Amino acid sequence: MGRKQLRLRAPRGRHERVAAALVAAAATTMLVQAARGLWRAIVRGWPFALAVAAAAVLAVIWWQVRRVRLRRAQATLVAVLRLPLERIDSLGDAEFEFALRDLLIRDGWSAQRVGQAGDQAADVIGRHAQRGRIVLQAKHTTVGGKVDSKVMYQVKGTAGPVHKADVSVVVTNGGFTRDAKAWGERHRVHWVDRERLRRWADDGVPLHILLRLPARRARRTVVRRAA
């Protein structure tokens, strides 16, 4: 058997109507009292609530101002960044990658260090409005160390397909073998050896000038019209 549905019926007779009216009046009175109590609590507590809100606004403003100041200070330092080769030679691998990132930022790129285990031949990735996306592979070594062709193969195989790079560069504080330089020039993998690194990091020559990177045209958006 199905369950019977409960239905409210209208009051019948004088006594039921009076009782219903009293219940409605009591409920209305309780709601009015609750509203009054809430309003009183708000009135009493508004100075505290206002103080909390003001403190929160001031904290947000202070954090934003501090963030802007830190960015400006960092930008000022990076803008005049000069790194002599002796300083670069003393860096660790990760420090070398961060230094290359800062040099890119100095030159007008928005860059970040991404090098870690499994980075697929990308230690620093940068973006530039006119020159596209750049991938740097850092090879910190001894002064007499040389980068061979294998590194160039790896960068060529991942810079475009994996990292969507428009420009790929291998940077070392050492040198490159003759085959590595020749292969890189044939396959558009740029190289920065010790001498080029000196001109970039110490003399302040921007990387795009050093490597003669062309400005890229802005991509046009094709709007298709409906037939």
Image (spheres, rainbow, N blue to C red):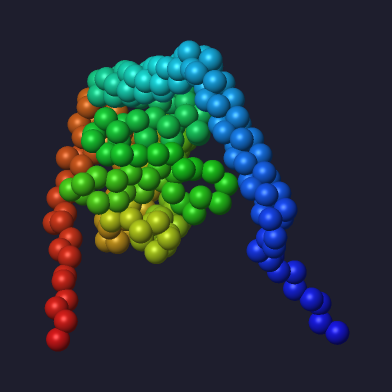
Q: Is residue 57 left or right of residue 223?
A: right
Q: Residue at x 47, y 26 (%)?
A: 91
Q: Residue at x 20, y 42 (%)?
A: 208
- Quarter of the image for the N terminus: give it: bottom right
Q: Residue at x 14, y 50 (%)?
A: 215
**Residue 148 on image: x %, y %:** 43, 50
Q: Is residue 31 left or right of residue 172?
A: right
- Quarter of the image for the C terminus: give it: bottom left
Name the one closer to the observer, 25 or 173: 25
**Residue 190 on image: x %, y %:** 29, 50
Q: How many marks?
A: 0
Question: Residue 36 occupies which quadrant of the picture?
Answer: top right
Name the one closer to the observer, 112 or 31: 31
**Residue 77 on image: x %, y %:** 30, 19
**Residue 194 on image: x %, y %:** 33, 34
Q: Residue at x 36, y 53 (%)?
A: 180
